[in-house]
Image (cartoon, helix red, strand yellow):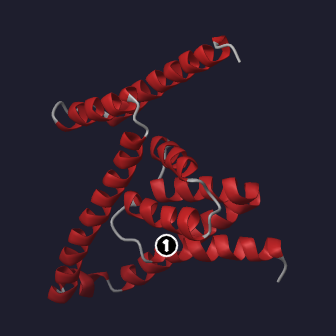
Amino acid sequence: MNEKARKFWTLFWSTFQLSAFTFGGGFVIIPLMRKKFVEELKWIEEDEMMDLTAIAQSSPGAIAVNASILVGYNVAGIPGALVTILGTILPPMIILTIVSYFYDAFRSNRIVNLVMTGMRAGVAAVICDVVITMGKSIVVMKRVLPIVMLVVSFVAVYFFKVNIMLILLACAVVGAIDTIVSEKKNEARPI
């Protein structure tokens, strides 16, 4: 198998496995994708993964699919995005097809209900991991504005129930303004 085919197979198989064994929504897949593509394969930098996560979250659609598309595109262009879409959507389609045939048996089965309850606890732990990992990377930057935005965003969503899209839009505007101001300051500095 040549290098290009191996890369496409790795993209497909990685996203297929991640999607097949990730329960609990899109945020659960993010730390697993980070581990796979940033730490293990080293195809993406940590900052890039943070950016891809932010874009995936703010785009319409399922975050797992959005993140897979962005990772695939980042690694191998449009063909990579298509491969990762396929790898991400196949497992849920297969699982849901099987579950739909046995839905009545699953719905009333006590053991299945207990397993689902246990999985919820695991999902909560993984989401906490995402929050800590992403929050830590913001704090490590040692810049005041991102930390203030993090705290204000949390307070606005948690306590005041502000729509998350308004928060994302406001953060995007503040981030864009901060970037423009920083670039102008860098241009004005003598070399």
Q: Position of residue 166 (x, y in %)?
A: 36, 28
Answer left or right for 147 relative to 56.
Answer: left
What residue is rendered at 56% in x and 71% in y?
40
Q: Residue 31: name its quadrant.
A: bottom left
Residue 173, compared with residue 71, is above or below; it is above
Q: Where is residue 130 in the image (x, y as percent from the top left)?
A: 36, 56
Q: Which of 6 and 118 is in front in this view?
A: 6
Callout count: 1
- In the image, farthest residue toward the front: 191
Quarter containing the C terminus: top right
What residue is rendered at 22% in x and 84% in y?
112
Q: Position of residue 37 (x, y in %)?
A: 58, 64
Q: How crowded is mark 1: few (under 14 residues within 10 Å), some or many (20 or more)?
A: many
Answer left or right for 14 relative to 31.
Answer: right
Q: Which amino acid does label 1 sit on?
A: Leu
Q: Position of residue 16 (x, y in %)?
A: 55, 75
Q: Which residue has dot 1 on it? A: 18
Answer left or right for 183 relative to 176.
Answer: right
Residue 29, compared with residue 141, is above or below; it is below
- In the image, farthest residue toward the right: 2
Quarter containing the N terminus: bottom right
Numbered disc 1: secondary structure: helix
Q: Residue 98: name its quadrant.
A: bottom left
